[in-house]
Amino acid sequence: MYKVEGVVDPILRTGATEAHEKLPIHFQTVLTCIPDFVIYSDFEEDIAGHHLHDILSEVDEDLRQSNPDFKLYNKLRAHGRDGLDYETLFGSGSGGATDNPGWKLDKWKFMPMVDRALRHRPEAKWFVFVEGDTYLVWQNMMEWLSKLDPGRPHYLGKHMYIGSVLFGHGGSGFALSNPAMQRVSQRWRQARAEIEAYTAESWAGDMVLGKIIKDVGIDMFWAFPHLQGDSPTTMDWNVSKLGREPWCYAPATFHHLNSREYEALWAFEQQWLLGHPYPSWTSPKFGDIFKAVILPQLRERRDSWDNMAAGTKYSTEAFVRLTEEDRRALSPAERQAPGSFEGCRAACESQESCIQFSFSPGRCATSTELRLGHAADVPCLEYSNAAAMCLKPGSGRRVEGSLSSSEEFIQAGWIMSRVSKYVERLDDSCVHIEEEWIS
């Protein structure tokens, strides 16, 4: 356990529609290492001995009574969890949508959350905000923040835009230094009615917060790759953004994890700590996590598995529509690709940079991006970078939505000789990285 009082205040944001599902794994894993944290929700309650604070009580009472976004909140206040009824089935998160009650409430939490967190722990140097499906690599986060000056106004975020507004994506986690918190809190108190009016017209609370932070003169620090919008099972391990590839850097968060993925990462962290105890602590890198958690799960063939291959696609349906000239342009391996798992593999092997593929009857997809993916009966993730690559049974295409049946025959494969070379090449690239932290 590491001493954090007066240094970092971790804040977890959740809601009544998801709290009982998503919080327990936090209490069993990462939060066991953090002696002092706070949980803000839209409903005051206790879960597994931990108190959840109603952050929406900070919003203007007249607004709560008049704005339809607060319909669920007012039902919760009046009837407790008995007021959830159908909203429970359509809560925010992987099963939700932008017009569901839980999502509508969520955008109102960000500004009052900053103000209340500062009142709760005014002496903290850093405030780290995460969601119910965010995995916080706590030791890494502490190490990263120690590289930065907490006396300056910092806003660390995974970059995202809505229109022209740049902000730190809430699910990826973001961090504010104490001076930044003070500026935002002061702005909230001075212009609360104006900010609430802007929130009412806006789509996302993390965007509202990002705009206000910019308004008070603080630029966002682009924290990629330390803050991640996807989980280790869905991220592209060789993605390049801002001229950086994750492999050689240290992660501070992952997003969109299910309980099994939490457990796998937690087990990795415990094993890593045993092998790298203080004072000889070394931060685990993305490459370390890949080799320990992801690589052992890759193989030549996995049945009932969608590895989210998202490159060249072949299907018997599409072939029928091809002109004779287009058919002749295909290689023999490509013509056979949708016919069988072996044919799909051959098509991938015929492409020099292809590293993985997926097959279902009449469909083959090959990819130059390496992902583990998930069991075929796991729901697709909404609002994830990988959402568009999730295979929906019977559709013949990848769509954002739920994979509702495990009966669809899906197989995944990796060209393991190329995976080995992939790992070697990325390991070699780390020679040119002098510091694992972007600061």
Image (tube, rainbow, N blue to C red):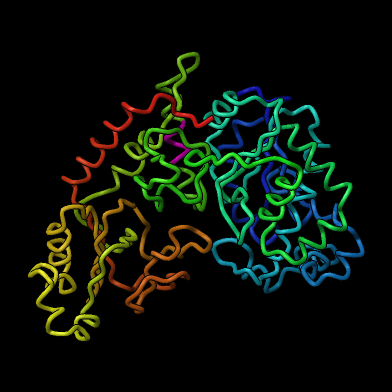
Q: Residue at x 28, y 67 (%)?
A: 410
275, above or below 240, in the image: above
Q: In which quarter of the image is the N terminus?
A: top right
Given residues 193 and 288, the one toward you in this image is 193
Q: Does the magenta stretch include residue 286?
A: no
How many dots with numbers? Answer: 0
Q: Where is residue 417 drawn, in percent x and y?
A: 16, 45
The single residue placed furthest to the left in the displayed view is: 332
Q: Give the range drawn in magenta.
A: 265-269
Residue 323 in which image quadrant: bottom left
Q: Can residue 305 be seen in this view?
A: no
Given residues 249 and 361, the one toward you in this image is 249
Q: Residue at x 49, y 53 (%)?
A: 258
332, above or below 395, in the image: above
Given residues 103 and 268, the one toward you in this image is 103
Q: Where is residue 283 drawn, in percent x and y?
A: 45, 26
Residue 150 relative to residue 270: left or right: right
435, above or below 257, in the image: above
Kindly report the secondary structure that dominates the magenta region of the rendered protein. helix
The single residue placed furthest to the top in the displayed view is: 279
Q: Where is residue 371 drawn, in percent x and y?
A: 33, 52
Given residues 386 and 54, the one toward you in this image is 386
Q: Residue at x 20, y 40 (%)?
A: 421
Residue 419 relative to residue 350: left or right: right
